[in-house]
Image: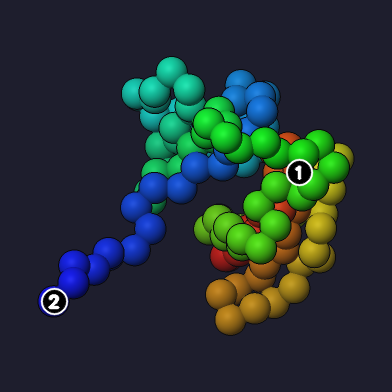
Amino acid sequence: MPIAIDGPDFIALQVHDVEAAASFCERHLGLRRAAVSPPHAVVFDTRPIPFAVRALLPGVALADSARPGLGVVLWFHTPDARRLHDQLADAGITIVEPLTDSPFGPKFSFEGPEGYTLTAHGG
């Protein structure tokens, strides 16, 4: 029988400017850096799945005009999606999809580091 995977175990966004992307995640999303990160990335202390921003892998070229992550939906849980929505909007962060109710609680999408579309839900 073939071996199977268990599911996502680590998620990282490839970015041009790791430090700027990490600062966005800290300042606007309240993420905290993990105690240890490799030199090419910043890993955050997220549970149950670690999340990071990292330098581009060899051979990857993100065009400035392309939307990074197109076709991938990355959701983050928050205890209060409505409050986070207002906080990000007040900070001038682009809201890509307005706050709506979903089977997973209130949700909305916003423009994250380097143009990635991220979704927040919960609360």
Say which quarter of the image contains residue 76: bottom right
Say which quarter of the image contains residue 114: top right
User: At label 2, which amino acid type do we have?
Assistant: Met
Checking the image for residue 24, the label placed there is none
In the image, residue 19 above or below residue 6: above
Seen at 40% across and 37% down, the residue is 45
Viewer-side residue, 56 vs 43? 56
Residue 82 visible in the snapshot: no
**Residue under circle 1?**
115
**Residue under circle 2?**
1
Q: Residues within 10 Å of mark 1 (few under 14, many from 20)?
A: some
Viewer-side residue, 117 vs 31? 117
Q: Where is residue 102 in the image (x, y as percent from the top left)?
A: 64, 78
Q: Residues within 10 Å of mark 2 (few under 14, many from 20)?
A: few
In the image, residue 66 above or below residue 113: below
Residue that protrudes farthest toward the top in the picture: 39
Locate the C terminus and report the quarter of the image it occupies.
Answer: bottom right
Q: Is residue 119 left or right of residue 46?
A: right
Q: Which colour scheme is used?
A: rainbow
Question: The residue tagged with tag 1: helix, strand or loop?
Answer: helix
Residue that protrudes farthest toward the left in the picture: 1
- Separation of residues labelled 1 and 2 (CA atoms): 41 Å
Question: The residue tagged with tag 2: helix, strand or loop?
Answer: loop
Earlier along the polypeptide chain: callout 1 or callout 2? 2
Seen at 81% across and 37% down, the residue is 64
User: At label 1, which amino acid type do we have?
Assistant: Gly
Q: Where is residue 48 in the image (x, y as percent from the top left)?
A: 35, 53
Q: In this view, does 2 lie to the left or right of 20?
A: left
Say which quarter of the image contains residue 14: top right
Locate the N terminus and report the quarter of the image it occupies.
Answer: bottom left
Viewer-side residue, 80 vs 19? 19
Q: Position of residue 82 (x, y in %)?
A: 71, 60
